[in-house]
Image: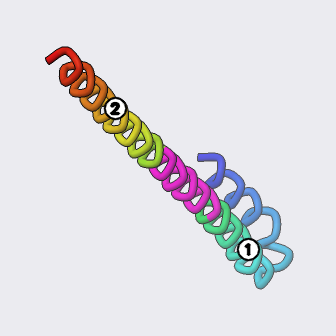
């Protein structure tokens, strides 16, 4: 809504004095808005990718640690059982 009001204001201000300027101003405003939206989308995508990579790395580390702990426990239990028997 604010963008429409801004364009309408610009159009009303410049149209009657400088008809050729109105189109340039509107194109510049549209290009700036599109660029800002593009930058926001790129930042959001980069943040999402970084978060996904961090989560995957954390999950892999946790799985490796759990597997190592389980293997160590099994080896220790086997050694203890072999001494008892």
Quarter of the image for the C terminus: give it: top left
Residue at 42% in and 48% down? 56
Across and down, in percent, residue 44 comes to 55, 53
Across and down, in percent, residue 4 comes to 62, 54
Label 1 or label 2, whichever comes before in sequence order: 1
**Which colour assignment does the render follow?**
rainbow
Residue at 46% in and 48% down? 57
State the residue position of label 2: 72
Q: Nearer the viewer, residue 46 or 26?
A: 46
SS class of the residue under badge 2?
helix
Residue at 27% in and 31% down? 75
Q: Is residue 4 magenta?
A: no
State the residue position of label 1: 28
| Number of numbered markers | 2
Q: Residue furthest right?
A: 17
Q: Nearer the viewer, residue 36 or 43?
A: 43
Classify residue 80 as left or right of residue 16: left
Q: Residues within 10 Å of mark 1 (few under 14, many from 20)?
A: few
Residue at 75% in and 62% down? 12
Q: Is residue 59 above or below residue 79?
A: below
Q: Is residue 52 magenta?
A: yes
Across and down, in percent, residue 62 comes to 41, 36
Looking at the rendered image, the disc whose residue lies closer to the viewer, 1 or 2, is: 2
Residues shaded magenta: 39-54
Residue 38 placement: quadrant: bottom right
Q: CA distance from mark 1 to mark 2?
A: 66 Å
SS class of the residue under badge 1?
helix
Q: Nearer the viewer, residue 58 or 50?
A: 58
Q: Nearer the viewer, residue 9 or 85?
A: 85
């Amino acid at each position: 809504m604010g963008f429409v009001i801004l364009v309408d204001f610009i159009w009303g201000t410049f149209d009657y004095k400088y008809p050729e300027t109105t189109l340039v101003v509107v194109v510049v405003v549209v290009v700036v808005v599109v660029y800002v939206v593009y930058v926001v989308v790129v930042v959001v995508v980069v943040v999402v990718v970084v978060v996904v990579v961090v989560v995957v790395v954390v999950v892999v580390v946790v799985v490796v640690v759990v597997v190592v702990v389980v293997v160590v426990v099994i080896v220790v239990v086997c050694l203890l059982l072999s001494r008892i028997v």
